Amino acid sequence: MANQYGSSLHGGNIYGDGIQTKIKYDFSVNINPLGLPKPVQEALLDSVASWKAYPDSECRELTKKLAKHHKIHRSHIVCGNGAADLIYRFAGWMKGRQALIPVPTFSEYERALGAFGCQVRHWHLREEDGYSVNISQLAEELQEGEILFLCNPNNPTGQAVHREEVEILAKTCRKKRGFLALDECFCEFLPKPERYSFIERLSHYPEVMIFRAFTKSYAMAGLRLGYVLCGDKTLAERLRGIGQPWSVSAPAMTAGMAALDMEEKDYLQQARELVERERQYMKNELTRMGFVVFFSQVNFLLFKDVEEEKHGNLWEGLRERGILIRDCSNFPGLKPGTAPFLYHYYRIGIGSKEDNEQLLKNIQEIVRKE
């Protein structure tokens, strides 16, 4: 699924899209700029000989470590081939129901729900509000029996709501016999994740589930490892039964356990500090160049190119230089402008200082037509 400039449904398309240019920098994805932790790399190398055996289809050791990490019983945890795998399992269980999704947001919620015959309603976040979520208005919008998907922090806007606000939605779902599906895959990049995550309150709400993944926070996108925490262990049992056996590979399990065993707080805290510093720097520089940059709290920025008519399509210009950014044209609510008012919305991941400087240098050259 691509537009005229070749932007795919997701970021990370470094394998070819019809333009024969080698990708040197990929800012279309949002993973930890520190890269895969060294203890995880070492654990993977040490485990190669064990890969000849089938992995544990129940992920016993991994769920045991996750249970200890999140202080939740392991019977409420289901692991999968990335968070997307679990989103599709949940949609399969909920088939035929109606869902409400604040947009713009991660596209796989709607794709998964649509694949199983669910009807989806969009609730549009407004640009004039900076794409922030008004929780009281969202709660009022929810209809009887609906599934509500909330990405917190949201992708592609990078904004989060506090757990007290999430609890308003959880209570509304209970009152209206609905269900709240929370995506917290970017939560670890927030300055104070504990103020936003709903995990601590999950045991009080059987109508809530929380998706998490190692993909972003530990930079292991290629290994595909996600998990879901369910307020209701019966739901966890059903999701476990829906999935294929061996959906989590032995290397992915090894990597996840190694990440949980290491001094992950130091690693994640270093990442938060780097992201905070570099995000502000990039926002300032992009604003200085004339882009409209929206508020973000995590490891990516959403911005609008309102002067496209002067310098051409930014995605295309950077792609020709071997740099990928995320064209947001396929996000509901972020459609590009047409002539004579040309504009596009883009999302960029926050990388290392050196990589960020390369991106800004190339954008500056395109803007100036150098």
Image: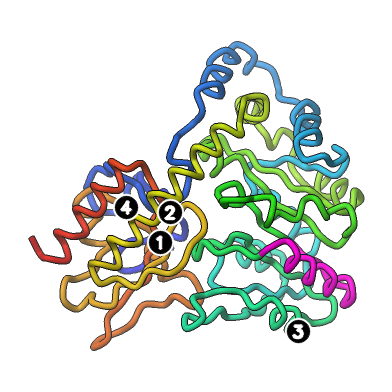
For the residues bearing labels 4 and 1, Cβ distance under 8 angstroms: no
The residue shown at (56%, 51%) is 191
Q: How many angstroms separate mark 2 from mark 4 (CA)?
A: 8 Å
Q: Which residue is mark 3?
A: 140
Secondary element at tag 4: strand
Q: Is 362 or 14 nearer to us in this picture?
A: 362
Provide the major secondary structure of the magenta segment.
helix
Q: Which residue is mark 2?
A: 11
Please give left or right for residue 272 compared with residue 144 in the image.
Answer: left
At label 2, counting other C-alpha atoms closer than 10 Å, the crowd grade (few under 14, some 14-19, many 20 or more) is: many
Name the disc covering residue 324, or none. Answer: 4
Amino acid residing under circle 3: Glu
Q: Position of residue 91 (x, y in %)?
A: 73, 61
The residue shown at (30%, 72%) is 305
Q: Nearer the viewer, mark 2 or mark 3?
A: 3
Please give left or right for residue 207 compared with residue 267 in the image.
Answer: right
Q: Confirm whether the magenta stretch covers residue 167.
A: yes
Magenta residues (range): 162-181
Q: Position of residue 19 (x, y in %)?
A: 24, 53
Amino acid residing under circle 2: Gly
Q: How many angstroms separate mark 3 from mark 4 (CA)?
A: 39 Å
Secondary element at tag 2: loop
The residue shown at (57%, 52%) is 190
Amino acid residing under circle 1: Arg
